[in-house]
Image: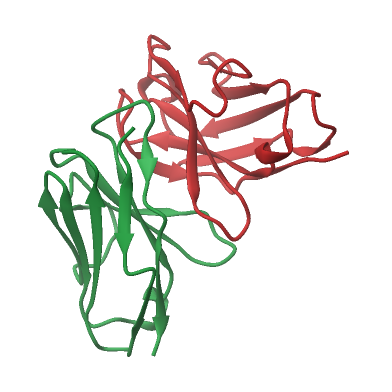
Chain colours: A green, B red
Amino acid sequence: ETVMTQSPATLSVSPGETATLSCRASQSVGSNLAWFQQKPGQAPRLLMHASSTRATGVPARFSGSGSGTEFTLTISSLQSEDFAVYYCQQYDNWPPLTFGQGTKVEIK
Amino acid sequence: EVNLVESGGGLVQPGRSLRLSCAASGFTFGDYAMHWVRQVPGKGLEWVSGISWDSGDIVYADSVRGRFTLSADNARNCLYLQMDSLRPEDTALYYCVKDKGWDIATFDTWGQGTLVTVSS
C-alpha cells in the first residue's frame, strides 16, 4: 500500500498570503496525484489531478507541482473561501487508492 | 450537470447487512469508473471500492474485501454497494463518486453522502 503523508497538519495563514501544502508518497506515484478541498458539511471537491492540472472551474491561484514522491499544492493570495481541509490522493498504485490525512488551512 | 444521489444508509446492528444505492445523472454512466469513498465524521477520507467502466475491474480496500460487493447497473444508471457482516468500524458517511475517466483513477464528482451507523 502506498502511504500518503501530508504536512503540516494545520497551516495558519492570513488572507492574501500564500499557503504551501506538502504531500509525500511512500513510493513513487509518478504524476498520478490529485488534490481535493473539503469545507465543513460539504463533500470533497477535486482541485487538481495529474499533479498539476487544475480541474474545471478551479481558480488559477491554485497550483500543483511535483512527481515521484514529493508534491506541493500552492494557494496564492488566499481568499476567505479557501480556508478548508485539503487532501492529496494517489492513483498510481492500486488497490488501494490512498489519501493523505489532510491539511487544515485556517485563518491566522 | 452531473448529479449523484446516495440512499440506503441508516442504523444497523453489527453483523447485519445494508445495501447502498447511488442514482447517477447528467453523464453517460457506462463510460466512467465509479467508486465509494467513506469518511468518519470529523476524520479523513478512505477509499472503499471502485469499478471500471465495463465492470472488468472491481477492487476493494482490504478493510472491506470479502464483506462488501460493488456492482453497477448501466441500464438504470445506478451504482450499488452491498455491505454484509457490518462492523462498528464501518460507521461512516459513504460517498458515491464518479471517476475522471473510464479506468480506476481519481475522483471527479462526489455525491452528498449517506450515513451508515453500525451499533447495537
Q: Identify the image quadrant of residue B28.
A: top left
The image position of residue B27, as x and y in percent, is 42, 32
Q: Residue furthest right?
A: B120
- In the orientation shown, which residue stands out farthest toward the top? B56
As displayed, is residue B92 above or below residue A52? above
Which quarter of the rendered picture does the N terminus of chain B lie within?
Answer: top left
Between A82 and A20, the residue placed more toward the observer is A20
B95 shown above or below B87: below
Q: Can you see residue B1?
A: no
Q: Residue at x 54, y 44 (%)?
A: B111
Residue A96 percent location from the top left of the image? 39, 30
Residue B73 lies in quadrant: top right
Confirm whether residue B68 shows in the render.
Answer: yes
List x then y, in percent, for residue B85: 73, 22
Count of number-bearing discs: 0
> Residue at left 13%, top 38%?
A30
Residue B57 vs B115, above or below: the answer is: above
Q: Is residue A57 left or right of residue B41?
A: left
Query: Eyeballing the image, is A25 above or below A57?
Result: above
- Say whether residue B27 is left or right of residue A29: right
Residue plotted at (32% across, 89% down): A15
Q: Position of residue A12 (x, y in %)?
A: 36, 83
| Quarter in which the C terminus of chain B is drawn | top right
Left or right for B17, reference B41: right
Q: Residue at x 67, y 40 (%)?
A: B89
- Which residue is nearer to you in this view: B87 or B111? B87
